[in-house]
Image (spheres, rainbow, N blue to C red):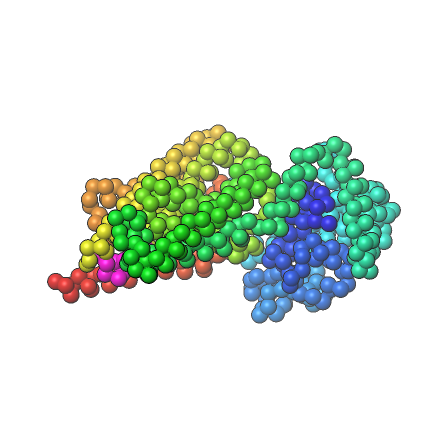
Amino acid sequence: MGSLPVQAGGRIKPFDSYARDLVLQITGGRTFQGWDPVELTLSWLADPKGWEDKPFILITRKDVKRQLGLNETISKFSPKELFNESFMAEYANSMGGQGGMTAQATPIARTSKPDPRDEEVKRLFERVITYRAIVSGEAWLVIPSAPPTPWKPLGSPGQTASDFSTLPGKSIRDGFMKIFANYLNADRAGYDKGVAEAKAAIVGEMHGEWTESLSNKISAELFYNRVHPYQIAWIIYFLAALCWAASIWLSADGVSAIYGAKGTAAGVSPSAKTGKFFQNAALPLTFLGLSLHILGMALRCYIAGRPPVTNMYESIVWVSFGVMVFATILWFIQKNSILFSIATAMSAIGLIVSDAAPAMIDPSIHPLVPVLRSNYWLTIHVLTITLSYAALALTLGIGNVTLWFYLKGAEGTTEGTKKITMLNLLTYRAMQFGVVLLAAGTILGGVWADYSWGRFWGWDPKEVWALIALLGYLAVIHARFTGWMRPFGFAAWTVVAFTLVVMAWYGVNFVLGVGLHSYGFSTGGQSTVTVFVLGQMGYVLGVALSRRGRLAKAV
């Protein structure tokens, strides 16, 4: 059933993707209690009474629950609780009967940040209205119309499954009637027959829209949904990171792993042999993870017909990929295993973050808002500036490892000094990539702004923070080049400077929430990001104080 074509969100997609979007919107998760999203959506429509008492509609904020007179200690509520035991029914009725996953007009700019409570109330309205539209059949846009007329729904408010055969699109509705009836009767053969009839009827009424290209895209999207290549990629990245770390730990005090085996005593001791084994395993794992990462992005580009950088989910995936690209370039130049140990760990973390909170970082494929509908500018500006974030994220990882060597007191030994020197050089090289790309991306953004909005620069928060990040890194790289900043200061300020990228990338969209870039705004994750930033600042300060105390004792 997941392969049935449905029109939603401005495009034709497989029902599998549409069901995933619906389940994510209503429950806040990719799945609910182990249900397949397609079957869950089908069950909602076929057996609405069976779901009346089951809690599955998400409410995140306690003040909203308090306002509706609901239990503040739980996060999911049943339709009965919301409609019969709270004030939700009158709110929902006041919103009207319009439902489904329809595209919303995006404002040109947002001049003030909306109240988070009001935003959650709006999202709750949308969840409730969408669920009501699913149960009534209004959200099932499966009756094709001649383009550009939108497809018609399977049902409408006030009608039940028994009324479907009396509405237009009879052959399609008959197929769905068989699906629902045989699903409730647990008749697998009859269910499969109903799915086949419904699909044939939909394709037959698509007025020439059903082409080989569309069929291939729907098949590709089903494969993408079910295989989930990013999840496999981060698992392999994580295994690769462990292997790289083991090889560095075991290979002759890490010297051969960091500088390469040439000219070292690698292979002399049993631990060095074990380290070589892990190193030999790590490299193919790294490139296998990278291949799966590329496969996921290629599928997403093919399905959407655009570069994969139009929302926070896609940008995190792209930045994680960029980290691997820059690490690979530097690895082929320097042959430093520590590069891949850092890059694979960071890419794994990035892909885990993109998957960890789907309600906040939406993984769905959506059509572009009007201001972004230029693949030329989307490619050269957004890909460029997000690639700069990737290079600078790599400097963050290398900087943290460098500070770890300082924390251990490695600068007091000859080998430790060599390690720190090499790591600083790698940080500097990665930062050069990042600064050049960030400068180019900022300038190209101004050119696109002139093309789209009629002005090159308007001190929009996104523009301002991109400039602040650029100036911050220019200061760090200039201080390192001129010798004003010593190796420890360079490593420390490299870590601190990434907070500017965090603000430009995440903070403007999720914290400030104002400006012309309103199409990228969202909410959530502030506590996690705050912990990350404070943790990094505390780490830098702790290493600085430890080093200062150690140097004072030495004097």
Q: Position of residue 357 (x, y in %)?
A: 53, 56
Residue, x 48% and y 48% (percent of image)? 288
Whether 405 is among the magenta residues is: yes
Q: Nearer the viewer, residue 202 or 149?
A: 202
Which residue is rendered at x = 20% and y = 41% of the image?
482
Tag count: 0
351 in magenta? no
Give the image location of residue 531, x and y in percent: 41, 60
Q: Residue 144 is drawn in which quadrant?
A: top right
Of 276 and 53, which appears nearest the observer? 276
The one of 8 and 272 positioned closer to us in this rendering: 272
Q: Residue at x 20, y 61 (%)?
A: 548
Position in image of residue 474 (x %, y %): 30, 41
Magenta segment boundaries in residue numbering: 401-411
Any part of residue 308 in sight: yes
In the rendered image, the quadrant that contains the C terminus is: bottom left
Q: Is residue 461 visible?
A: no
Residue at 76 percent of width and 33 percent of height? 207
Judged left or right of residue 327, residue 15 is right
521 and 433: which is toward the camera: 433
Instruction: Give x and y (percent) for residue 113.
Output: 49, 50
